[in-house]
Amino acid sequence: MKILFGDKKNLYKANLHLHSTYSDGKCSVEELKERYKEKGYSIIAFTDHEHLIDNSRLNDDNFLAITSCEVAIKQYRDLSTLKRHDMKVTHLNFYSKDPHNIKTPCYSSFYDHYVKDEIKDIVWQGEEYERVYSPDGINEMVKRAKEQGFLVSYNHPTWSLESALEYINYEGFDFVEIYNNSCALKGQHDDETAFETLLQNGKRVFCTAADDNHNIRPFDSVYGDSFGGWCVINADSLDYSEIMTALENGDFYASTGCEIYSIAENDGKVQVKCSPVKKIALYTSTRRASFALAEYGEMIDFAELKLDETDVFFRIRIEDEHGHKAWSQAYYI
């Protein structure tokens, strides 16, 4: 039996996309840490807009801050997406493998409106870079970021108004957001189609779920944008390098409420153990799929699903009675 997920000692809950008062969020990093720890999170990537800040002072035995930021490449540089709702844009998250590396790849002061007086001394703004909204321009930014020691996420393609016509030409992403809670609250669907399309076209990419929260409304409001999407990372310890290696290797799953405990391959079958759900489904590189359904009024927490010799890869999706989901990574046969 080959264990594909769940062979490490611990499972750590993580929000990999979040904004604080260091950019346009309404809560400090300290408050966000405490609020998320109360909900069982161990990891936050503080992806404030356009600049990196080392938040490692927040780390303790049960919490880890990932040095990260979100950058934008707009179709029309001089226009705002807050006013031009029809404008395409690419948003990328950069996650530093070194927690103390705060040199923002492809930094542009034109985009960075968020450096307030109280953080000027802790922001390394870097050399100016001219961002170009085109496949070549975006691919060059991804390439430079990875050369400088970052993992790269492609964020909320639906909100960005980008379709396969755009993202099929992008190269080098480590992750794509399959679910963005802030976008979902606005009524935009999840981006499983983008994940599937990238996989079907040979892109070795992992899926993430995240909040992208700004906390404009209270945490307990029905309009609150926290605690709706997360990743669960399988690692032996809450060590920065180990967590980054787990992310780089795809040792995690994305969720909006369901839990995956383990995924194993054994003699042409995939065994899935999870929290009680209504459906456990296996999707492949072809149109072939396999699934297990709970009987009416019942739930299931295990399934054994067959593989086929034509499958190049498979991935798992589970769903409960409330519509909450969890998505595995793609595993290549």
Image (cartoon, rainbow, N blue to C red):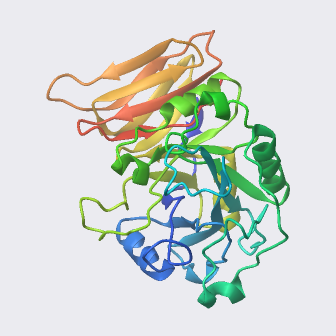
Residue 203 appears left or right of 255 = right
The residue that appears at 81% across and 73% down in the rendered structure is: 126
Residue 26 position within the rendered picture, expressed as x and y whole percent measured from the top left: 43, 75
The residue closer to the viewer here, 177 or 319, is: 177
The residue closer to the viewer here, 33 or 135, is: 135
The residue that appears at 40% across and 41% down in the rendered structure is: 188
Rendering quarter of residue 300: top left
Residue 278 appears left or right of 93 = left
The residue that appears at 63% across and 59% down in the rendered structure is: 243
Residue 196 appears left or right of 106 = left
Quadrant position of the N terminus in the picture: top right
Residue 308 position within the rendered picture, expressed as x and y whole percent measured from the top left: 57, 11
Q: Is residue 256 above or below residue 240?
A: above
The residue closer to the viewer here, 272 or 207, is: 207
Rendering quarter of residue 200: top right
Rendering quarter of residue 50: bottom right
Residue 158 position within the rendered picture, expressed as x and y whole percent measured from the top left: 50, 39
Quadrant position of the C terminus in the picture: top right
Figure disc tally: 0
Residue 14 position within the rendered picture, expressed as x and y whole percent measured from the top left: 50, 59
Q: Is residue 51 above or below residue 173?
A: below
Q: Is residue 85 above or below residue 198?
A: below
Q: Residue furthest left?
A: 297
